[in-house]
Every structure is written in C-alpha cells, then in structure tokens.
Image (spheres, helix red, strand yellow):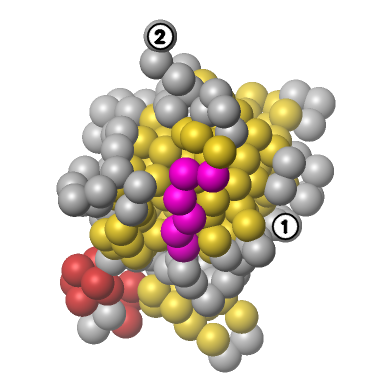
Amino acid sequence: MKARKLFQIRGASRSQFDQGFENANFRDIIVWQQPDLRQFTKFGQGDGSVKALISAGNKVFTAHQDSRIRVWKVSRSSENVFRLVDTLPTRKDYLGKFIKQSNYVQTRRQHKRLWIEHADSISCLAVSNGLIYSGSWDKTLKVWRLSDFKCLESIKAHDDAINGLVVSNGIVYSSSADGKIKAWGKSGKNSMHSLKAILEGIRTFH
C-alpha cells in the first residue's frame, strides 16, 4: 500500500499523498517522509510567512503574507527538490491588465491595485473542479484557473478578513472575522460565482 502525505501548517493538518508538509519558521516548508516521519526535504522562499498550503496533482500551492500565491513542482531531476514554477498573479496576467485604468480598484485611501491582486495576507486556499480559490484579509475571494493560473474573478465577499475556505459539491464556503459563513456557487459552467446563502441564521438567495 502506498504511503500517505501529511500536510501540516502550525498544528492544522490533513492527510494526502506520500510525505508530510510543515511550515517551519513560517517561510520554509518541511517535507516529512511517512511512515517513518523522517525529514525528506525543505523548500520555500518569499517576503512573508506561509499562511496556507494545498496540493493539486503534482503541484503545491502556498499562500503568503506578502499577498502572493506561489506554485511549486517536484523537479524532474530529483524527487526531493521542489522548484518554484510560478507566482500568482502571473506576469502574463499583469501585462494583460496593467494599462487599462478600469482594471484598478481602490484598496485603501489613495491606494489602487489591479483587481487580480490581493491587497493583504492570503489566509486560505481551496482547489476544486479546475479552479483555485484564495481568501484574504483584504476581504476578497479570488478565483484562479488551474490550467494557466489566470485570475477569473474577484469577489468582495465579506466585511472583515476571510480566514477559511471549503469547497463541497460545487459550493464554495467562506468564513470571516465578520462572524458570517457565506456560500458561493455558479448557475452554469461558464457563469460567475454568486452568493447563494449566508449562514447566520440562515438566509438564502435564489
């Protein structure tokens, strides 16, 4: 039977694949080999601590305090070397949007950013049906396409920092310091996400 991986960040853990991942010094990711729990390798870099980690296929996605998502892949030359292959938003996404003023949104007084950028720490990640979801302390939920890492949507989801994301049966649930859990879904394959329910008592939207 194939061994499993354990992804662990600051005490919150879940089992998956063959090794274990742990946030060490809040910037490095340590990979532990199971079942003997020996240190397998270590990787990571960035201008901010790692806030969340998730895997999809042969890639590992890390969310950082510097408002970036980093994408890692096992090197072809060595299985214990994880190589940084991209950062979200991607350079291609930036180049396609930075000229048009309509792509900028107000984040703080006298500060504007492209709508594809998070303006604060990214606190949580989720992956489902070819999409990556990221929640941030900037109160937004962003949707990225897994195939090319393009940002597809930016949703002003909450009135305070988002601190949790879960996807189940096509519905994205976001939790926030505003005390609410919100459910987001799509009406069709090519539609945008819209609010379906607020779990605060409970209110539903049709």
Note whether 142 is above or below 168 in the view shown.
below
Seen from the viewer's position, the closer of residues 45 and 30 is: 30
Seen from the viewer's position, the closer of residues 26 and 88 is: 26
Tell me residue 199's x, y (percent): 72, 29
Tell me residue 142's x, y (percent): 45, 52
Seen from the viewer's position, the closer of residues 138 and 40 is: 40
Image quarter hosting the N terminus: top left
Q: Which is in the foreground here, disc 2 or disc 1?
A: 2
Secondary structure at badge 2 equals loop
Q: Residue furthest top?
A: 1
Note whether 96 is above or below 196 in the view shown.
below
Note whether 70 is above or below 173 in the view shown.
below
Residue at horizontal 39 percent and vertical 46 percent from the top: 60
Tell me residue 187's x, y (percent): 37, 26
Upstream in sequence: badge 2 or badge 1: 2
Tell me residue 178's x, y (percent): 78, 50
Query: Is residue 56 shown left or right of residue 168?
Result: left
Residue 80 lies in the magenta stretch: no
Q: Is residue 25 visible?
A: yes
- The amino acid pointed to by label 1 is Asp
Image disc number at residue 1: 2
Write down the residue under mark 1.
160
Q: Residue furthest bottom?
A: 110
- Main secondary structure type of the part rendered in magenta: strand
Which region shows up in magenta?
A: 39-44
Note whether 87 is above or below 127 in the view shown.
below
Residue at horizontal 35 percent and vertical 47 percent from the top: 80
Q: Distance between the residues labelled 2 and 1?
A: 45 Å
